[in-house]
Amino acid sequence: MYCCKCGAQNDDNARFCSECGLRFRPENYDAVPVQPVQPGQPIQPSPAVVPIVPTHSTKNNVMCLVGFYGALSSIVMMGSTSPVFFIISLIGLIKCNKTKEPGRGYAIAGIIITSVMMGTFIVGVIAGLIQRDY
Ligand SMILES: [Zn+2]
């Protein structure tokens, strides 16, 4: 190798130029540990991409509960919101049946309540129409 400063020819392994004394490499060049490459080591996932814990089972239970409490709330709403919570309860029941989860009782109760409320709501509407017409 040739010195970049004075152009003198030096041994390839020389650390200093024999002519001008230019330091070719840091003194601890050989001591610097090379970052060990570890093939097969799994890449550490960053916190941002940590897989979300599956909340599958609880979601279905929540749906049953929402259906049930929505059904209760629809009583206050004179049954006008019953169809919405009837559907939610029904979906919750179907999903809980598939996954053998608890919460089916809530879904069934929600379906019963919404069914009754829808019935009374429809009867009430019809009764109202009849009273208005006659
Ligand atoms: Zn030199």
Image (spheres, helix red, strand yellow):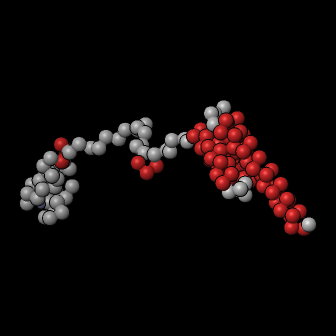
**Which of 71/100 is in front?**
71
Q: Is residue 22 visible?
A: yes
> In the displayed structure, does residue 34 sit left or right of residue 41?
left
Residue drawn at (71%, 39%) of the image: 108
**Which of 37/124 is in front?**
124
**Which of 74/100 is in front?**
74
Residue drawn at (43%, 39%) of the image: 42
User: Residue 116: x percent and y percent?
Assistant: 77, 46
Question: From what the image shows, is residue 31 above or below residue 81?
Answer: above
> In the displayed structure, does residue 119 sit left or right of residue 29?
right
**Which of 54/91 is in front?**
91
Q: Residue furthest bottom?
A: 133
User: Residue 104: x percent and y percent?
Assistant: 67, 36
Q: Is residue 56 visible?
A: no
Question: From what the image shows, is residue 104 above or below residue 83?
Answer: above
User: Residue 96: x percent and y percent?
Assistant: 67, 37
User: Residue 121: x percent and y percent?
Assistant: 78, 55
Question: From what the image shows, is residue 75 above or below residue 134?
Answer: above
Give the quadrant of the C terminus: bottom right
Residue drawn at (72%, 45%) of the image: 113
Q: How many marks?
A: 0
Residue drawn at (49%, 44%) of the image: 51
**Quarter holding residue 84:** bottom right
